[in-house]
Amino acid sequence: MPLAIRIYTRFVFLLLITTLVFGMLSSWSYLYPEIFNRYLPFYQLRPVHTSAALFFIISAATLCIILFNRDTLGRNATSGRWEQLFIFTWIATILVIFGYYGLKKFGGREYWEFPGWLAFPLLSSWTFLMIGYYKGWLKCADKKPLYIWMWSTGILFFFLTFIEQNLWQIPWFRQSFLRELTVQWKANGSMVGAWNQMVYGSSLFLMVMISGDKSIARNKKAFFFYFLGLTNLMFNWGHHIYNLPAHGWIRHISYVISMTEWLIFISIIQGFKNKLTEARKLRHMLPYKFLLAAEFWVFANLTLALFMSIPAVNRYTHGTHITVAHAMGTTIGINTMILLGVLGYALDIDNKIGAGRKLFIRSYRLAQGSFIIFWLSLVLAGILKGYRSVTLNITSFQEMMEPVNKVLVAFSVAGIGVATGLIIIVIMYWQAAGKSQSFVKVDK
Amino acid sequence: MLRLVWGTLFIAFCLYTGWVYLYCDEKTEIVQNDPSVAKGWELWQQKNCQSCHQLYGLGGYMGPDLTNIARDSSKGKQYMHGFIKYGTGRMPAFGMTDEEVEHIIDFLAWVDKSGLSQVPAEAVHWSGTYMIEN
Ligand code: HEM
């Protein structure tokens, strides 16, 4: 295994651990700011948490693509030099970003809260990845499997949306507050779609590998849902800004497009029986367990998202912890679960775990169980805030938040469970990555 | 066939993007050219106020939404100045000068002019969407 990939794998694990530790700290500093404000204020912890979370997802997604790419596109398709360049510049920039957070120097954009100039090294780094990836892609004879489409789409759209997200640095975009906010959330919304393409692509790849059924990456239905996802990536970002008095069509288009996701909802229900049979066959595999969990969280979060996409309902949920439930529900429940599954497969965790299997399964259960409480408390906190602010119209912020903050104690306690379970799993992955012959070789 | 669908979607995406940039804000009369607002906006970002506060409901959730605080007659400039300059038990102070605090207040007053964060009940259309008067 090349050194760069070894380092990158460790870096990905460290990002996940940072996310979890700083998530826990943020939740307590939210509840007890008087204690934290002096040394670790919420406004410093939250950026570390959210940036680490997004960098974890994007880095792990690219790591999976880099790992599998060599096997699917052909070992000689790329020299690997561009990927190495990507890995080192990417890691270095992220470290500088955390350094800035440590010094309380911010750029104040949602999730990407670092000073604006750091977008340039990140973008250059991504360009290196793109060159490496597309060079291999051009040479590859069989580009038909859907996961290759998804990886290629994700990498391209991350590049486009990342540029869009930084357009605010051009003065024209800042002449109007509504324009600035619209473009920022257009980019943020589509970027989530871009990393989902990368993550779902790897999940599909994993399913092909463990089921041995190549047709699942080539059938018409799969491609139909790919295009549905792509359409949503492109046109369904407006739900973030329904309440903005921007052009009405932005709202209407997003509303109509988001309703196409009912098709996904129906398809999950239809496929439920087959899923059960599949689960009975494959559930002894640890990586499959994560895919199964992701499947459950897709269903729960999709149900929530479908309602939040109706402006009349969004009126109550926007700006409340329901948004946080949606954000963490999808990033932990779907993205992190899939990535842990795919990385577990790549590390051949089933064969390396040995006597640790019991602890692994216990930690998995702890994380899932706590996560259900975590997610439900955020939803409940959001409903309470929506009801108290919109229906009861309570104007005093302290008074409005009082019962909400009580529910958030349950959230913060459950957060300790989620973090503990996942940290134990990451440590086991770390050990597995240390054993020689760490990555499985796949056969396409 | 797959490439055709992809290409068509991509072209539609590019056209829509251009349209959004040019026409998302129809209230072109409130072009921002006040240096104090620009400075206030910069400070808002550098101090990371958005990690605790929302504008149009977007941001962190520890503090209140500040989109329309400027029009709240029960609060006013003095009140805002006090919060931003000295903080509270929950909100930290940032050690800003009076001048810097004024820039932020100017920025918030400008944001307020762009619209209402809370959509009024009358704006909800029977189809579920909003019809917001611009
Ligand atoms: C893999 C694990 C995790 C991921 C990917 C993740 C991701 C995120 C994201 C994307 C946000 C932004 C949400 C928004 O503003 O709408 C967020 C916020 C937050 N997360 Fe996490 N998170 C993780 C684990 C945790 C854990 C274990 C805790 C512990 C309780 C936690 C506590 C928080 C808190 C307090 C916020 C701030 C919410 C606010 O603004 O009030 N997170 N997280």
Image (cartoon, coloured by chain):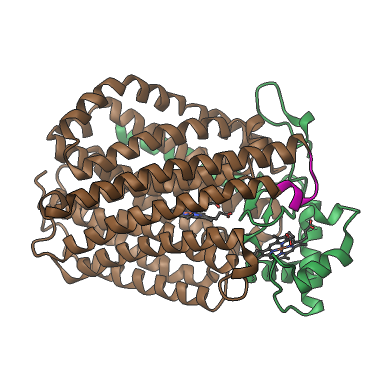
Percent of width and height locating residue A229: 40, 36
Residue A395 part of the magenta-drawn span:
yes
**Quadrant the N terminus of chain B occupies:** top left
Q: Is residue B112 rendered to the left or right of residue A81? A: right
Q: Is residue A358 rendered to the left or right of residue A195? A: left
**Closest to the observer, B1 or A253:** A253
**One can see residue A138 in this view:** no
Apparent colour of chain B: green
- On screen, A70 above or below A301? below
Residue A188 part of the magenta-drawn span:
no
Quadrant of the rendered image containing residue A309:
top right
Q: Residue furthest right?
A: B73
**Closest to the observer, A30 or A299:** A30
User: In the image, what residue occupies the spot 83% across and 69% down?
Assistant: B81
Q: Which residues are magenta?
A: A393-400
Percent of width and height locating residue A249: 64, 34
Percent of width and height locating residue A50: 48, 59
Q: Is residue A420 rendered to the left or right of residue A261? A: left
Quadrant of the rendered image containing residue B54:
bottom right
Percent of width and height locating residue A286: 20, 44
Apparent colour of chain A: brown
Quadrant of the rendered image containing residue B107:
bottom right
- On screen, A141 above or below A158? above
